[in-house]
């Protein structure tokens, strides 16, 4: 990982409601085409409790086409506060420093909260695609995925 490169962003990975804390979980998974990546715990600043996580997966592969570059989960007691969108927004400057121009976030068609998160971020719905049987294991059994594209260009 680009540890020294990342350390410069630690102070910026927080806002008035959440902070992102780098996990030591290994995101690298060559079988999925993930060359590198980062997982962050989303901590609610008021309570200092872990509200969920967000992962940034770097690489390109057929598996990542369905899995997406960004994955997140907000635990039940913390849902409805926009923490997933806030976490994504906090990562945008870091992703730009990694010279990424866009990333894909996928959501199940019936996952309204996740789809609203993507829309709130200004993502573009690229397509809704069927997930091949051979990739459903990495997509928690999902049969279809909405592919949202988050443009990171500062002029976008």
Image (cartoon, rainbow, N blue to C red):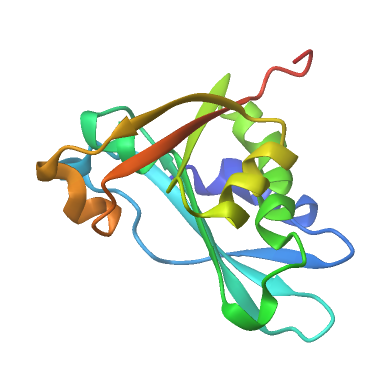
Left or right of 2 in this view: 112: right
Q: Quadrant of residue 62?
A: top left
Of the 4 image quadrants, the one containing the C terminus is top right
Task: Out of 149 and 98, give the one closest to the viewer.
Answer: 149
Can residue 35 be seen at all in this image of the molecule?
no
Left or right of 99 in this view: 104: left
Left or right of 64 in this view: 81: right
Judge whether 150 appears above or below 137 on screen. above
Can residue 80 be seen at all in this image of the molecule?
yes
Whole-percent x and y of residue 142? 29, 52
Task: Report the residue at 64% width, 51% height from top.
Answer: 7
Tell which residue pokes out farthest to the top in this image.
155
Judge whether 31 appears above or below 73 on screen. above
Left or right of 76 in this view: 92: right
Task: Report the residue at 49% width, 66% height from top.
Answer: 23
Tell which residue pokes out farthest to the front in this image.
110
Task: Out of 130 and 147, give the one closest to the viewer.
Answer: 130
Tell which residue pokes out farthest to the left in this image.
134
Q: Quadrant of residue 106?
A: top left
């Amino acid at each position: 990982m680009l540890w020294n490169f990342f350390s410069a962003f630690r102070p910026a990975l927080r806002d008035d409601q959440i902070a992102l804390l780098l996990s030591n979980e290994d995101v690298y998974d060559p079988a999925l085409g993930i060359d590198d990546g980062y997982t962050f715990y989303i901590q609610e600043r008021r309570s200092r409790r872990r509200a969920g996580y967000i992962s940034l997966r770097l690489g390109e592969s057929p598996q990542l086409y369905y899995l997406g570059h960004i994955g997140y989960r907000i635990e039940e007691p913390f849902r409805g506060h926009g923490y997933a969108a806030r976490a994504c927004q906090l990562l945008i400057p870091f992703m730009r420093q990694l010279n990424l121009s866009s990333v894909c976030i996928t959501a199940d068609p019936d996952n309204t909260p996740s789809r609203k998160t993507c829309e709130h971020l200004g993502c573009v719905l690229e397509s809704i695609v069927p997930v091949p049987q051979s990739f459903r294991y990495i997509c928690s059994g999902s049969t279809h995925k909405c592919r949202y594209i988050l443009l990171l260009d500062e002029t976008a």
